[in-house]
Every structure is written in structure tokens, then in C-alpha cells.
Amino acid sequence: MTTQSRWKAELHDSHAYRELAFVVDKTNYLEYTLKSILRKYLAAPSDRAAFVKDILLHSSIIGLGQKFKLLQFICEREQWPKLDPNSFHSVLNIRNAFAHSDTVTQIIKLSPRTNGKSEIAEVFQLVDSISSSGKHKELKRSEALDEFVQHWVAVRDYLHDIDTNYADKPSAKAI
């Protein structure tokens, strides 16, 4: 009789893993807020509200990008303020870059010294992504994280405004 080994996750407390967790968590928050806006706008009857929230708007049914497209359509239709889609797309591209980039390889830059030897000038990791338009972008993880935060704050503030001031107001146009 053979016994099966039970594997356990090894959680590393590295800087790269903390950055990845931060980016994924913050992106998930944007999706949560988008779902809130869409639920309020759809105003499903109470017997269907759970279906809309738990099934229809589930990320495996309608992805984050599609939820944003729905919001763009609603904003156009209802004449709500619009967000520059570049901020949202930057959040998604950087999130994907963090989620799918190498976390093992480090770039080591050396600088020559006068005695003929070199010293380590800088150690960093890269993230790279290819946008939906096919543009390749490679950044230091620290630069990508800073860019992510700047775009994330813009998107978060915009979504909070829509969620607070517009989402549950009656529709200006009949569907």
C-alpha cells in the first residue's frame, strides 16, 4: 500500500511576493467596486440580486475588462463622467506584468572601480508586458509599482465617485 504525501504551500516573505500580493489585492478592490456600481445600476429585484452579484458578475463569467466596458457604455448612455481608459488599461497591464513576470532573475549592474575591480552598483528585477495594441514594455519592478499606484488611485477615485454619486440614481434613458 502506498501513502500519499500531502504538500503544503511554502509562503516566502520576499519583497517581490509582497509587491505581487499588493498589486493583485488592489486590482481586486477595483473589481469589487465595479461590481458594486453595476449591481446598483442594474437594480435587480431582491429575488434576483444574489444571482446578479454572485453569478452574473462573478469574474469567471464577466472579467474585469468586460465590467469596465459595461461601465464605459453606461457612462456614455447616462452621460456620467468618463475615465480616461488609459488609466484602467495601465492598471490591468501592470497587474498582468506582475502576475506573470519572472520573480527569480535579478539584473545586477556593475560599476568599475579605479583598482580594476568592479562593485555592484544596482540590483533589480524587471516586469514586462505586451499591451493589447502589441507594444512591449519593460520596467524595473519598483518603477512599475509606482506607475501602478498612480493609475490605481485615479481609477479608484473615479469609481468611488460613480459608486457614490451616480450608480443608484434612476436611469436617464429607458433601456
Image (cartoon, rainbow, N blue to C red):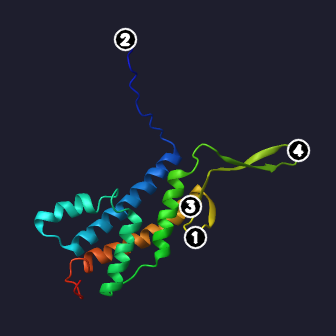
- Residue linked to disc 1: 133
The reply to whether discs 4 and 2 touch (Cβ–Cβ < 8 Å) is no
The label nearer to you, 4 versus 2, is: 2
Question: Looking at the picture, how far across and down is residue 58, in whole percent?
Answer: 30, 58
Q: Residue 144 shows which numbered tag?
A: 3
Left of 15 or right of it: where is 2? left
Q: Amino acid at mark 4?
A: Gly
**Mark 4 and mark 3: span between their CA atoms?**
34 Å
Q: Amino acid at mark 1?
A: Ser
Q: Measured along the vertical axis of the image, is residue 169 above or below residue 89?
A: below
Q: Amino acid at mark 2?
A: Met
Quadrant position of the C terminus in the picture: bottom left
The label nearer to you, 4 versus 1, is: 1
**Could you tell me which residue is drawn at 31 percent across and 62 percent down?**
32
* Label 2: which secondary element: loop
Which numbered disc, 1 or 3, marks the residue that appears first in the sequence? 1
Q: Residues within 10 Å of mark 1 (few under 14, many from 20)?
A: few
Question: Looking at the picture, how far across and down is residue 14, in whole percent?
Answer: 51, 43
> Is residue 78 visible in the rendered structure shown here?
yes
Q: Nearer the viewer, residue 135 or 12?
A: 135
**Could you tell me which residue is drawn at 28 percent across and 74 percent down?**
163
**Could you tell me which residue is drawn at 53 percent across and 51 percent down?**
100
**Mark 3 and mark 2: span between their CA atoms?**
51 Å
- Quarter where residue 10 is shown: top left
Question: Looking at the picture, how far across and down is residue 26, in whole percent?
Answer: 40, 59
Which numbered disc, 4 or 2, marks the residue that appears first in the sequence? 2
The reply to whether discs 4 and 1 touch (Cβ–Cβ < 8 Å) is no
Which numbered disc, 4 or 3, marks the residue that appears first in the sequence? 4
Left of 61 or right of it: where is 52? left
- Residue linked to disc 4: 116
> Is residue 80 visible in the rendered structure shown here?
no
Which numbered disc, 4 or 1, marks the residue that appears first in the sequence? 4
